[in-house]
Amino acid sequence: MWTDVSTCISKQRSIKIACRVWDQSTNLSVITNGFVCTGLYPPSLNKMLYRLSLFKPSEVADIGVNKTWQKRVDSVRDHVLLLPPTKKRKSATRKTFTVSGKFIKADFHDLLQAQAEAKPKRKKKATRQAENNVEDCVI
């Protein structure tokens, strides 16, 4: 939002005002009259050739290109204007955090996984439902 001492106008409102002013101030007749003055409207080959005949070429003789300048331009194009090669990433490494907020990289992560696999897993406690089952035996 644009603010000043005496005015406060939003960007959207200012764009609407500018569009309205452009529509009201631009007339097709003005544009057409500009082309009529140049002799290009309505399109006519005779008028275009007449306007072209009014053009006068340069009176200065054509100056050839200096060979030393051309060599310099070529060397600048070959050596100076080259962009450096893009850096190639070795591999996209996945980064993870520990609880304390430190980075764990892939090799350290593999070490932690190996340590976790080396620890013996605790056995689950058996439920006592097996003892509560009463089997009926007939003797």
Image: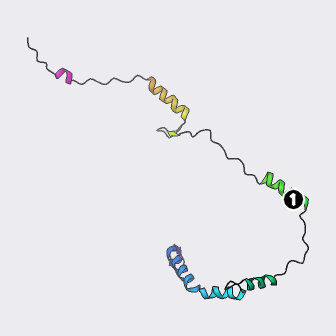
Give the dominant element type of the magenta stretch: helix, strand or loop.
Answer: loop
- Image spot of residue 98 (x, y percent): 48, 37
Range of magenta residues: 125-138
Q: Quadrant of residue 105?
A: top right
- Image spot of residue 118 (x, y percent): 45, 23
Q: Residue at x 83, y 55 (%)?
A: 74
Query: In front: 129, or 40?
Result: 40
Q: Quadrant of residue 62?
A: bottom right
Q: Residue furthest front?
A: 45
Relative placement, left or right, of 36 versus 71 is left
- Above-or-below relation of 137 to 52: above
Q: Residue furthest top?
A: 139
Quarter in which the C terminus is drawn: top left
**Which residue is the site of mark 1?**
70
- Image spot of residue 103 (x, y percent): 53, 39
In the image, is residue 34 part of the stretch drawn in magenta? no
**Amino acid type, callout 1:** Gln
Query: For numbered disc 1, what is the local secondary structure?
Result: helix
Query: In front: 65, or 93?
Result: 65
Relative placement, left or right, of 134 versus 10 is left
Q: Residue at x 87, y 59 (%)?
A: 70
